[in-house]
Amino acid sequence: MKHKLYILAGALIVIISGCNLNDNLSDASGTFEADEIIVSSEVTGRILQMDIDEGSVLAKDSVVVVIDSTQLVLQKQQVEASIHALNEKTMDVKPQVKYYQDQIAVLQSQLADAEYEKARTERLIKADAATTKQLDDLNNQIDVYKKQIAADQEQIKVTKTSVGTQNSTVMSEFRPLRKSAAQIADLESKTHVLNPINGTVLTKYAMAGEITQPGKALYKIADLSIITLRAYITGTQISQVKLGQHVQVLVDENSKTDRNYDGEITWVSDKAEFTPKTIQTKDERANLVYAIKIHVKNDGTLKIGMYGEVKFK
């Protein structure tokens, strides 16, 4: 009878222990990651200032790297000098037009006088006080004045066309130079590298005094205030999760206790994949799983690459 009681007690212990074990199992596990940004140079030059270290916390839009802009300044000055020289090559048509307009004004005054004399001579001829030769001379003079006025008016048109063509040729060089100056000014502004986000410097790739060039990495930064746990769930669990769902995230504090965090599911993969070898046993690698991303507010203790476990609420 005693043996039977011992067996029943042992079975109860196993059942109770099994229940407790199942309660402690997590629903998913994975590693923490963050959206990392590699900040690169956009210009060539010597790095004059780079006062950052790995682990430095940087504010968005703060100037963290200064690159020597001497060559760009000289290039911009050269382009601006070329633009100034083009301005001196352009011609102002107004003085020439005014010259012909003044001539036309004098001719029109003379024409008016001649037409007045013509009218007076015609009246005198009717009274036999003037000859037809005088009238013919006046008509010839009026015709000359009209032709000179027409010639000067035509000359104004020719002058405007000629000067306009010359100025257009000059201005055709002006526009590319202005574009070139704008491009150099844009590059000059990029010699002061602005930090793109609020975040922590993860890796530093360059030092003050080095020569950099477009595309060369300067440093890597990530916002660690909100860190992402990339975990994996099975096909049977996919129906239990949805975007915006809050879950419990567990991280080892020591060998006996865990730290608990509140997490929010922000992404669920729409494609199944094989279980990552790093977080599952060999037998489970053949199973297809779905990746999920969980945002967790970082209290400063969570680091990229740390393991975390998930319990669905």
Image (cartoon, rainbow, N blue to C red):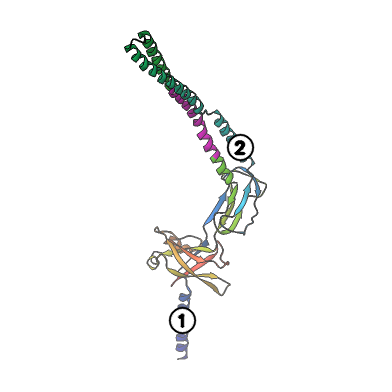
Residue drawn 41% across and 19% down? Answer: 113
Residue position marked by numbered label 1 in the rendering:
16
**Which stretch appears magenta?**
156-181
Q: Is residue 285 above or below residue 40?
A: below
Residue 195 drawn at (x, y percent)? 57, 54
Are there few (<14), some (14-19), or many (20+) residues within 10 Å of tag 1?
Answer: few
**Disc on the earlier residue, 1 or 2:** 1
Q: Are marks 1 and 2 in contact (CB under 8 Å)?
A: no
Query: Which is more toward the observer, 280 or 57?
Result: 57
The picture quadrant where one finds residue 80 is top right
x and y percentages locating residue 156 in the rendered image: 45, 23
Dominant secondary structure, magenta: helix
Nearest the eye: 43 or 182: 182
The extreme left residue here reads 126
Q: Is residue 179 magenta?
A: yes
Q: Residue at x 37, y 16 (%)?
A: 120
Three-letter amino acid code at disc 2?
A: Gln
Where residue 219 appears, x then y in whole percent? 59, 52
Residue 285 appears in the rendering: yes
Spatial CA span between label 1 and label 2: 84 Å
Q: Nearer the viewer, residue 221 or 179?
A: 179
Residue 277 has which mark? none
Q: Give neighbour class at mark 2: few <14, some 14-19, many 20+ (Cα, 10 Å).
A: some
Report which quarter residue 115 is drawn in: top left
Residue 77 has which mark? 2
Q: Is residue 72 left or right of residue 227?
A: right
Disc 1 versus disc 2: nearer the observer:
2
- Does residue 298 sit above or below 184 in this rendering? below
Q: Nearer the viewer, residue 125 or 158?
A: 125
The total of numbered circles placed on residues is 2
